[in-house]
Amino acid sequence: MIRIKIIFLLILSFNVLFASINSDSNEKGASLKQDTSHVNSLLEFAASYRKNDAQKALEYANAALKMAEKLDYKEGLIKAFIEKKKCYFWLNQFKESILAAEKAVAHAKNLKNSYWLIESNFALANSYFTVSDYVNALRFHLEALKVAENQKLNTRLLDIYNAIGIIYFRQNNFAKAEEYYLKELNKCYELKDSLYLAAVYDNIAILDENQKKYDSAIEKHKLGITISENIKDTNGIISGNNNLGLTYKKMAMFEMALKHFDITHQLLIKMKPVDSLWLSYTALNRANVYTKLKKLSYAEPLLIEACAYLERLKDNMGTTDAYQNLFELYEAKGDFKKSLYYHKKYVAIKDSTFTIEKTKQISEMQEKYNVEKKDFEIESLNQQNKIKEAEIKKQTILRNSLIGVAVLLLLLIGLIYNRFKLKTKSADELNRAHNDLKNTQQQLVQQEKLASLGSLTAGIAHEIKNPLNFVTNFSQLSQELIDEFNDSNDDEDKQDILRHLKSNLEKINHHGKRANSIVMSMLQHARGGEGEKQMTDINQICNEFTDLSYQGMRAKVPDFNCLIEKNLDSNLPQLNVIPQDISRVILNLLNNAFYATNDKFIQLKNHHQESNFSPKITISTLLINAHVHIKIRDNGAGIPANVKQKIFEPFFTTKPSGEGTGLGLSICNDIIKAHGGTLKVDTEMNNFTEFIIILPL
Amino acid sequence: MIKIMIVDDEQDVESLFMQRFRKDLKSNQFEFHFAFSAESATQYLSSLNPIDIVLILSDINMPGKSGLDLLKEVKSKFPQLKVMMVTAYGDQQNYDKAFSLGADDFITKPIDFEQLREKIVSLGGT
């Protein structure tokens, strides 16, 4: 959520930026006046097009540039380059944006004009800020600040203080950030500038919030909002309420957060033109709070709409957030299918932005190190100056050089230590982020498993209660039979009772076992990964379990015969899998295959059809594109289309009551998914069924 | 004599009912017909002329047509027949669905046969 906050910050500072129109007060000669005013009109055109059609704005800026060159109109050149810089920003061409700003600075230096030196350096600093190059951003802000303070000019002073504060805030250097915000604050009071005053209170509040000083943060947010309200600055009121809402959210005061997000929303929909990006971010914030408040039906439509808009806009950061909110929402709702759908999308987009984030993270850490180094350099420069003064005073060259060496040594040691610390830190943080991701993934697999079980209470009730019904009633009946046996004098009657008793006890035994196996299957289904992954010979598992399964089938159906064909790829590499789990899947699929062939055989026999059908199963392994394919094929009756859709659903079975729990394929599917693979089925009625397990290397 | 059809895909139901109601069967108070699917139940019903059964006891969860499908069909074709649902699904949803389709009674498994006997007598007598 912080990301959105920073965007708001940025938007705020850019809005302030664009709000001020370049004033052109120093027209040089009356003869040039008309032509220079032409340059300025072109630039005004450019400024008005910039936000909606930056390409067109750039054309105007280039035209202005050409004309200014022809007229040797220096200020026009600087203004045109600054305009180009802004156009490139809107076109997302950041390199070009920096180049244009550099040209503006060069021309301003030639002109030796303080106002334009400040403006151009400020523009250049902002270009660097956009690409997260905080060292250079800081450097040119300080350059601009130096000119402004030396010449006692207030030009851009508030903007510069604000920008430097934000840079330090981004670097988590809260003390320095506060220093510059306070400078800005004092200047605001001095200049009686309420617009910036409101913004700086908001920024200080965010600083407080990050240091967990929530009371102070809320107070300052409210102060900022009040100031914005007094001067009727809608942008300020909007961002103030949004930021206050975020603070309340961080404090887990969701009702209050919602109140302020609602205010933000209300104001945004009244704005003309409507800023859909802001509106989408606000929708995300509101939906997030609704989810926290368990008002899921409010959150859902908000998220879907915002998500669609952000997707269209290709706003990766917002879309990632929307997906995350959506999968969390559906998880809370118990709609695991949709939850999984959005989680997949979330992971996909996160993966694609992960590398970007990672690079950015590293570069930010690098920058942090550089900023600290810069501070150090400034300090050591000051120190060197002092040493020079001492040298003049005492003329003790030896001592001075000794100090110099000592300082240098210290500096070196400090730098090496600092660099070492930052490097380990960045590696640590990356590892942690990676581990977090892995843990979340594991939790999700487990959650999915439990969820599929949890949503099946009715199925479980049925599966357990049916055998239980028989156990209860047949045992009670047997007690009555024993009483009857004792009361009876007729031998034949007694024999009859004993026969009934035996049959009842068999039934009790059978149904007791049936209930037990259902419970066992359920436990296996719910169990987290107990086995450990190890390098496993898939061919060996296929060999062993084909025999095991066949023998199992023959034990049940003594006259069962089946042709078994094995096509095992002898060059198959070992796979890093949980062997018990993969064995279970293969065994389960083999059992199904044998069952299917036997079933078809019996069907044909029962219908007295003369046929030359002979059961056959084929098991094959092969390596395709760094994936191991395991295929188990039978020549049974095939699976009808309507059944095929459901075979991976838990408790779905076509076997007669009592013969199957309907959990087998569901568990198989879960296991293969947990291994990052896929389980597919290919079938043709009356012809064959083939299950294909695909596992990554 | 009350003639009853029992519909359940669990085959052991037959043995259970025959033993449980053996006295009533001996004294010709009850007579049972067992159907192991909803399809065979409707087939049996349409083969009867006249329909001499007065009560159907049906499971809900069965392969193929469910007990609720059967209930709906029976109530539209033979409204005079009483239907009692006997199911492991004791949840409110099934309960409400069964009554909205016109079920006369609803009991859950494991079956309490004393209670079932009373219900059969009262339903069969009216």
Image (tube, rainbow, N blue to C red):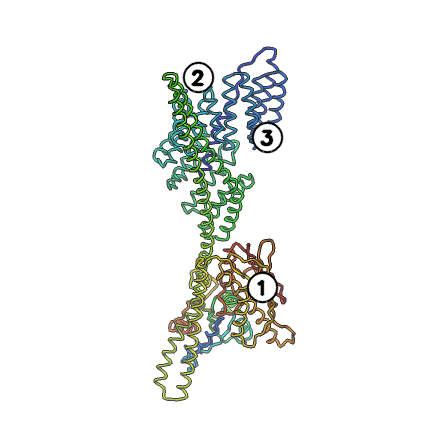
CA gap between label 3 and label 1 equals 59 Å
- Residue indicated by mark 3: A53
At label 3, the amino acid type is: Asp
Instruction: Using the image as rendered, state which of residue A547 and residue A323 is in the foreground.
Output: A547
In the drawing, what numbered circle is on residue A152? 2
| Spatial CA span between label 2 and label 3 | 38 Å
| Amino acid residing under circle 2 | Lys
Q: Please, which chain is the residue tagged with disc 1 on? A: A
Q: Residues within 10 Å of mark 2 (few under 14, many from 20)?
A: few
Q: Secondary structure at mark 1?
A: strand
Q: Secondary structure at mark 3?
A: loop
User: Quick check: do tags 1 and 2 share a chain?
Assistant: yes
Bin the neighbour count of mark 3 within 10 Å (Cα to Cα): few under 14, some 14-19, many 20 and up: some
What residue appears at the point 54 percent right and 19 percent down from the top-left corner?
A: A108
N-terminal-most mark, 1 or 2: 2
Is A532 displayed left or right of A539 in the figure?
A: left
State which quarter of the image contains the N terminus of chain A.
Answer: top left
Nearer-the-camera pick, A414 or A664? A414
Q: Earlier in the sequence, mark 2 or mark 3?
A: 3
